[in-house]
Image (cartoon, grey):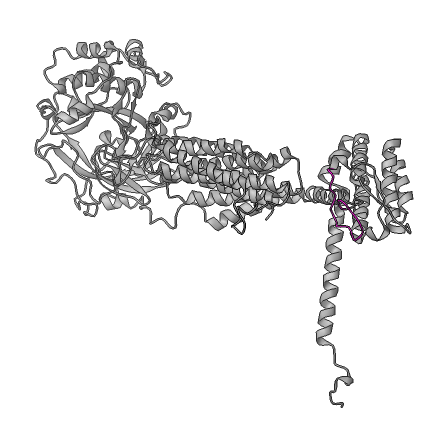
């Protein structure tokens, strides 16, 4: 293996070794194999480009283009032109994936699921670092600065991990970098000659290691020692979501299921409310007789920092067959179990599962996890709601005003967590809350007064054109301007309730949808909603509706409402397999022909088990990658072949007339020129006739062929019938070459005549430089189109086809001769009996 090839291999290996630090961040680690394969293709393209050779910028450009095609094939094949050429749609898709990956980074704790966005960030990041390392270490032959991108890759991984095995990954990355440095040192040493072994240490003693090798070992030992110490230093870390260690999180789980820190879902809520076309998001059928309370809850926001509300980091566990009774719900509160079957639109990709609250059981296919505190389901490993149909059993809880008014104080830990407000919250928020609830004797009355203040008596207006607002004064501005939409109302009421000592949080989801003629319920984008939930011991988390003209006012917030205090269901929840009631019901969401639950549910069949795993098979990725690389390289083959052929011819021309250093009698060794290219001028070396070997003749003829092919590329078609002297005159005449360049053409032609016809031929040196002068002159006199064609589609590249044809003809002739030998009939002289 050549030194440059070894350096290329070490460059790719160093990148992969540094990338190992990313392995603990994502589960599963199948992305690593994909990144390794694509990195090998990228490095191979660089090796081929340097072998041609291409100019350094062109080498980097070729690798960058191949990398882009590979990423397009893997991540945006459906959006690309003919499946591999990235266009505007493919770039938009890649940008969307990167944005989704960025959201996932903030959403998930370590190890994060391998979503498409995260996979693109991982694979693309490794390829980018690999390109930088290959460019610095191999293309520009300076391995030391290549440690910077490797360090950046490791630092990102170390900053995100929990630090348990940082020393191991640092050791692997450092070993890769040292391997790269040693490979570069060996490659540089080899350019000066054979790597020597050194002199024996003493008479008859063993051969000692070379001084550079000894020094390298010492440096490596010190560097690895430092590498082991550095991760132990108290460096700053980054917190939040995937940027934090998994830990045990918070909530009821034991941490074995991982944790999730959800991205704030309010980012797109305002946009959903302002769409021109109210697209259907969910279609559902339900057994409830009252749609007014059928809110579909997605997630709860319980972390309030004074600026906004967001989900707290929670443990997630496997989805149990039967969900536990909601926290705080006592047996004396009336509840009814309902069944709702939901079908999500094919374009609606939500990570959380919209469900009525509180759920008792869920039937759904795919990879889902359960967050016990909020009683929500979240997709795992990139799972979302797109096209899903699922069934939820839930409780329709109907407390009375008396039950809420007489609720005892919440438990200390829950009250401490859900009444916390930051010191930065403007004082006007708490002051307004006290003023509005003046005269109330219990938390229930205070909650109702807050709801009525926003929805009825406070003079607030519903307006979706108002910005959500950020900063610690956002709620104060809303209380002053009195204009906003559900986000403002729910945020403000929950914050004010907390200042009054009432546990509060914000829920995000969908308000009740619109009944359809076929008995189903349609939930659209404009039904997106946010509402506050307040906690009352004995009832649990209870919905309030402060947003005017939106949603429905809960019946238990009307003082006259009363009801039976005995529960309809003795159990808080039923099994998912419990048979529905055979009693007919006048459900407003069932058609006249389908009075029973089974009749309603059958209209939306549940999803079957999912087939196969996620992602594209590795062999398909490999095939498409090779196809993309071929599609990119094939149009460039004439240029690459021509560049390679020119490089070989001119390299051989450097030694066409040189004799070995200190030459004396005996055959010359091909390529034994002891002088640099700059020293090789137009010098005639007197060499005995027997030293102009067959190889030297071949070198001179190769230079002559390069000169005539160069003229051909610039429009001067060669005439094989002419002698070298007349062919040179023709090139000078048609190319309109000046006298200095004309002498170069004639000098090469003269060298050809010398090696072919002279009785005592003389070998000349520096012929390659003469051809370079001729090519520069022809290029200078040619037009832009001719120059472009001479590089991209050279005419002389047709010789590659002729060479293949000649080889194919020779091969057929050889096989025909061998076959004839095998089947030839023996002659009578072989001793066979005659007929």
Is residue 100 among what the camera can see? Answer: no
| Residue 658 in picture, x, y percent from top left | 79, 44
Above or below: residue 696 compared with residue 375 = below
Task: Give the quadrant of residue 400.
Answer: top left
Q: Quadrant of the C terminus?
A: bottom right
Above or below: residue 457 compared with residue 745 = above
Is residue 366 among what the camera can see? Answer: yes
Please state the extent of the stretch shown in magenta in the rendering: 660-676
| Residue 62 in picture, x, y percent from top left | 61, 37
| Residue 15 in picture, x, y percent from top left | 48, 39
Give the left or right position of residue 191, taking residue 376 as reference: right
Give the left or right position of residue 549, taking residue 53 as reference: left
- Looking at the image, the residue that sits furthest to the front is 203
Above or below: residue 831 compared with residue 462 = below
| Residue 383 in picture, x, y percent from top left | 35, 40
Residue at the image point whose x is 22% and y is 14% from the top: 453
Residues 595 and 294: in front is 294
Would you say the magenta stretch is mainly helix, strand or loop? loop
In the rendered picture of this protein, how many numbered marks are placed on residues? 0
């Amino acid at each position: 293996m050549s030194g440059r090839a070894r350096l290329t291999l070490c460059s790719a290996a160093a990148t992969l070794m540094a990338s190992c630090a990313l392995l603990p961040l994502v589960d599963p680690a199948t992305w690593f194999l994909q990144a390794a394969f694509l990195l090998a293709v990228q490095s191979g393209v660089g090796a081929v480009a340097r072998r041609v050779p291409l100019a350094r910028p062109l080498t980097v450009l070729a690798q960058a283009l191949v990398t882009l095609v590979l990423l397009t094939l893997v991540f945006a094949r459906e959006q690309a032109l003919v499946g591999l050429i990235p266009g505007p749609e493919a770039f938009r898709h890649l940008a969307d994936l990167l944005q989704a990956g960025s959201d996932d980074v903030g959403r998930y704790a370590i190890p994060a699921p391998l979503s498409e966005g995260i996979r693109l960030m991982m694979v693309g990041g490794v390829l980018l670092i690999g390109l930088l390392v290959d460019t610095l270490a191999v293309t520009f032959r300076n391995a030391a600065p290549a440690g910077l991108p490797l360090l950046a890759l490791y630092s990102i991984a170390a900053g995100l991990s929990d630090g348990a095995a940082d020393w191991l990954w640092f050791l692997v990355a450092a070993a890769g970098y040292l391997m790269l440095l040693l490979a570069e040192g060996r490659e540089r040493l080899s350019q000066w000659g054979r790597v020597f072994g050194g002199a024996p240490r003493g008479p008859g003693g063993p051969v000692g290691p070379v001084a550079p090798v000894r020094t390298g070992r010492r440096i490596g030992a010190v560097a690895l020692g430092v590498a082991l110490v550095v991760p132990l230093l108290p460096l700053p870390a980054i917190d939040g979501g995937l940027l934090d260690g998994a830990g045990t999180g918070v909530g009821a789980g034991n941490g074995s299921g991982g944790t999730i820190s959800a991205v704030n879902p309010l980012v797109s809520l305002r946009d959903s409310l302002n769409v021109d076309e109210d697209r259907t998001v969910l279609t559902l059928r339900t057994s409830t007789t009252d749609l007014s309370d059928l809110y579909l809850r997605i997630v709860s926001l319980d972390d309030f920092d004074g600026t906004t509300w967001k989900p707290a980091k929670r443990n997630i566990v496997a989805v149990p067959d039967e969900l536990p009774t909601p926290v705080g719900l006592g047996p004396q509160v009336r509840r009814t179990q309902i069944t709702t079957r939901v079908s999500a639109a094919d374009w609606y990709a939500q990570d959380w599962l919209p469900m009525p609250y509180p759920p008792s059981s869920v039937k759904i296919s795919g990879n889902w996890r359960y967050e016990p505190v909020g009683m929500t389901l979240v997709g795992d490993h990139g799972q979302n709601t797109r096209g899903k149909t699922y069934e939820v059993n839930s409780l329709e809880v109907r407390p009375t005003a008396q039950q809420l008014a007489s609720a005892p104080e919440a438990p200390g830990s829950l009250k401490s967590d859900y009444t916390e407000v930051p010191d930065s919250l403007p004082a006007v928020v708490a002051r307004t809350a006290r003023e509005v609830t003046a005269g109330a004797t219990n938390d229930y009355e205070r909650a109702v007064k807050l709801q009525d203040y926003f929805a009825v008596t406070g003079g607030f207006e519903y307006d979706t054109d108002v910005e959500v607002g950020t900063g610690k004064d956002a709620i104060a501005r809303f209380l002053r301007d009195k204009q906003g939409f559900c986000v403002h109302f729910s945020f403000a009421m929950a914050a004010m309730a907390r200042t009054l000592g009432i546990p509060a949080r914000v829920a995000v989801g969908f308000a009740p949808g619109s009944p359809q003629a076929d008995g189903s319920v349609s939930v659209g984008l404009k039904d997106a909603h946010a509402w506050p939930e307040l906690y009352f011991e004995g009832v649990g988390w209870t919905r309030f509706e402060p947003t005017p003209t939106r949603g429905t006012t809960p019946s238990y917030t009307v003082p006259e409402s009363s009801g039976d205090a005995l529960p309809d269901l003795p159990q808080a929840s039923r099994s998912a397999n419990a048979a529905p009631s055979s009693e007919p019901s006048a459900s407003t969401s069932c058609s006249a022909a389908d009075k029973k639950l089974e009749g309603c549910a059958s209209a939306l069949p549940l999803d079957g088990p999912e087939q196969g795993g996620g992602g594209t098979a590795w062999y398909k990725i490999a095939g498409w990658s090779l196809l993309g690389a071929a599609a990119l390289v094939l149009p460039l083959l004439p240029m690459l072949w021509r560049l390679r052929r020119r490089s070989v011819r001119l390299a051989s021309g450097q030694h066409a007339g040189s004799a070995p250093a200190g030459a004396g009698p005996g055959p010359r060794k091909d390529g034994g020129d002891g002088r640099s290219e700059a020293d090789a001028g137009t010098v005639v070396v007197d060499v005995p006739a027997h030293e102009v070997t067959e190889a030297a003749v071949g070198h001179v003829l190769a230079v002559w062929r390069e000169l005539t092919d160069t003229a051909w590329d610039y429009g001067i078609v060669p005439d094989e019938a002419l002698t070298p002297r007349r062919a040179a005159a023709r090139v000078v005449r048609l190319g309109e070459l000046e006298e200095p360049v004309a002498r170069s053409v004639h000098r090469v032609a003269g060298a050809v005549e010398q090696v072919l016809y002279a009785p005592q031929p003389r070998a000349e040196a520096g012929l390659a430089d003469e051809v370079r002068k001729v090519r520069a002159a022809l290029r200078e006199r040619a037009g832009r189109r001719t120059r472009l064609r001479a590089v991209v589609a050279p005419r002389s590249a047709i010789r590659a086809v002729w060479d293949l044809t000649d080889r194919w003809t020779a091969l057929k002739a050889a096989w025909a001769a061998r076959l004839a030998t095998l089947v030839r009939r023996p002659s009578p002289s072989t001793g066979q009996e005659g007929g």
